[in-house]
């Protein structure tokens, strides 16, 4: 089939994606002993993964002369594809340990990890493929634009407190 527009011909494709995510993890360990040993351990991991994929196309395809097909306009022809992606991610992790012993050894360890992975894989295409396209007044404008904004904030904090009448130690990371 053919398309004949008496004036301006505009073909547009717009796509948007907006991701707002918050992930927080926390761990607390408390160890107490009146005997010889108190051991406390806390581990926490916060992971945020965000993915935007897709296809955004504004195309005139396969309107070819062999099949007696064409696209004609009496004014300018505009073909435009626009894509906008926005990812706002917050990932946080907090770990704490408290160990106390009235005996000889008190040990504590806490580990906090926060990770964020954001992936955008949107294909944006505007154009003319295998087609006969013409205009009697004005030109043909083709535009494909992709804008992506990623704001990712990660934080991790750990604290350890140990007390003993003899040997005490804490590891945090």
Image (cartoon, rainbow, N blue to C red):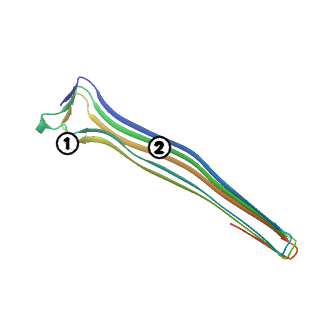
Lower sequence index among marks 2 and 1: 2
Q: Is residue 9 left or right of residue 114?
A: left
Q: Which residue is mark 2?
A: 85
Residue 136 placed where, x, y %? 20, 28
Q: Is residue 85 left or right of residue 58?
A: right
Between the C-alphas of marks 2 and 1, the distance is: 30 Å
Q: Quadrant of the C terminus?
A: bottom right
Residue 110 placed where, x, y %? 71, 65
The residue positioned 70% from the left and 58% from the top of the image is 27
> In the rendered view, would you say 58 is above or below 121?
above
Residue 111 placed where, x, y %? 67, 64
Tell me the crowding category of disc 2: few under 14, some 14 to 19, or many 20 or more residues within 10 angstroms, Cα based: some
Q: Quadrant of the N terminus?
A: top left
Element under label 2?
strand
> In the rendered view, would you say 170 is above or below 146?
below
Tell me the crowding category of disc 1: few under 14, some 14 to 19, or many 20 or more residues within 10 angstroms, Cα based: few
Circle on res. 130: 1
The residue positioned 52% from the left and 46% from the top of the image is 87
């Amino acid at each position: 089939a053919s398309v004949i527009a008496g004036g301006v011909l505009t073909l547009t494709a717009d796509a948007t994606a907006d991701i707002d995510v918050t992930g927080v993890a926390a761990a607390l360990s408390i160890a107490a002993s009146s005997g010889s040993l108190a051991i406390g351990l806390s581990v926490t991991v916060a992971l945020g993964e965000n993915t935007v994929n897709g296809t955004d196309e504004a195309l005139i395809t396969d309107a070819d002369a062999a099949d007696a097909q064409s696209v004609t306009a009496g004014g300018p022809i505009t073909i435009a594809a626009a894509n906008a992606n926005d990812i706002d991610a917050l990932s946080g992790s907090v770990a704490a340990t408290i160990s106390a012993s009235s005996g000889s050894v008190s040990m504590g360890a806490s580990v906090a990890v926060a990770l964020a992975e954001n992936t955008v894989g949107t294909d944006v295409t505007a154009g003319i493929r295998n087609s006969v396209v013409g205009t009697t007044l004005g030109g043909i404008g083709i535009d494909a634009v992709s804008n992506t904004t990623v704001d990712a904030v990660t934080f991790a904090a750990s604290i350890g407190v140990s007390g003993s009448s003899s040997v005490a130690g804490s590891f945090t990371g």
